[in-house]
Image: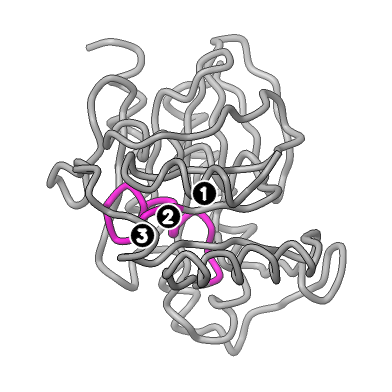
Amino acid sequence: MSEIDARFDLAQAVGAEAGALALEFWRKRGDLAVEAKAGLQDIVSEADRAVERMIRDRVTGAFPQDGFLGEEYGAQDGSSGFVWVIDPIDGTSPYLFGMPNWCVAIAVTQGDETAIGVIAAPTHGEVFTARLGGGAHVNGVPMRLTGDLRVNAAATGVGSSYRTDPDWVARVTGDVMRLGGVFFRNGSGALMLAYVAAGRLCGYLEPHMNPWDCLAGMLMVREAGGRTRPYPAGPGGGAVVVAGLGAWEDIDRLMGD
């Protein structure tokens, strides 16, 4: 078994365990301690931290020389060349308000390349996976984009956060509608990226995403046969544009330069 295959097996197992733990907290969300980070729209709960700690502990037990980059506990250097990029609960706001649109997102990078992606959505009973060169799957069923989805005949995911310029959101959503499409947002960028890979959305765009939010889903889109804009290496993040081939030109144009 190759080094990547061994980590892919672990990522799938840990993703399922992390999803189950997050779901347990979600069912008792009224008891969770919550605090603001950068502002009232940037929040963290004890569930986020507990899930990330569990993932780190499981990975360290199996691959002690691997590094980490997590939303809640930051970066930890390793010596193996592999880095686990973790969002323990993507969609914390929907999570805390009792909506099912959240997920656990795990990516594993090797150098500047994303090799593994796992997105577990336990409230929907779905686990999305991708391995570099090995395709993308949901619950073990291959995801393959056919190229026939277009903006005027499907929904386009539009992401935003407290960092996003409201004028950008107004322009993009208006432009989607002028193309004859409809826009979609569920509060979890990682889950919407997985939906593009599954052919449920024709594309997704957001002016800034952190690596833990998007690396797993971007790999899924590429492995399913879609396209993604280049994404900057390092922890700083950047713009994300992904789409199936039939919608790519329109989605890329919507983002602009």
Work out whether residue 165 or residue 181 is closer to the camera in this orientation and state it: 181
Disc 1 is placed on an element classified as helix
First along the sequence among labels 1 and 2: 2
Tally of marks = 3
Q: Is residue 247 magenta?
A: no
Q: Name the amino acid, label 3.
A: Leu
Q: Name the amino acid, label 1.
A: Met
Residue projecting furthest to the left: 141
Residue denoted by label 3: 201
Residue denoted by label 2: 18
Q: Residue at x 57, y 45 (%)?
A: 253
- Magenta highlight range: 187-203
Q: Give left or right: position of 45 versus 9.
A: right
First along the sequence among labels 1 and 3: 1
Q: Position of residue 90 (x, y in %)?
A: 55, 60
Q: Give left or right: position of 90 versus 69.
A: left
Q: Position of residue 171 (x, y in %)?
A: 69, 66
Q: Would you place residue 46 above or below residue 56 in this image?
A: below
Disc 3 is placed on an element classified as loop
Mark 1 near mark 3, Cβ–Cβ under 8 Å?
A: no
Q: Is residue 194 magenta?
A: yes
Which of the 4 quarters of the picture holds residue 116? top left
Residue denoted by label 1: 54
Mark 1 near mark 2, Cβ–Cβ under 8 Å?
A: yes
Gap in Å between the C-alphas at discs 1 and 2? 7 Å
Mark 1 vs mark 3, foreground winner is 3
Q: Residue at x 54, y 76 (%)?
A: 95
Q: Residue at x 52, y 37 (%)?
A: 215
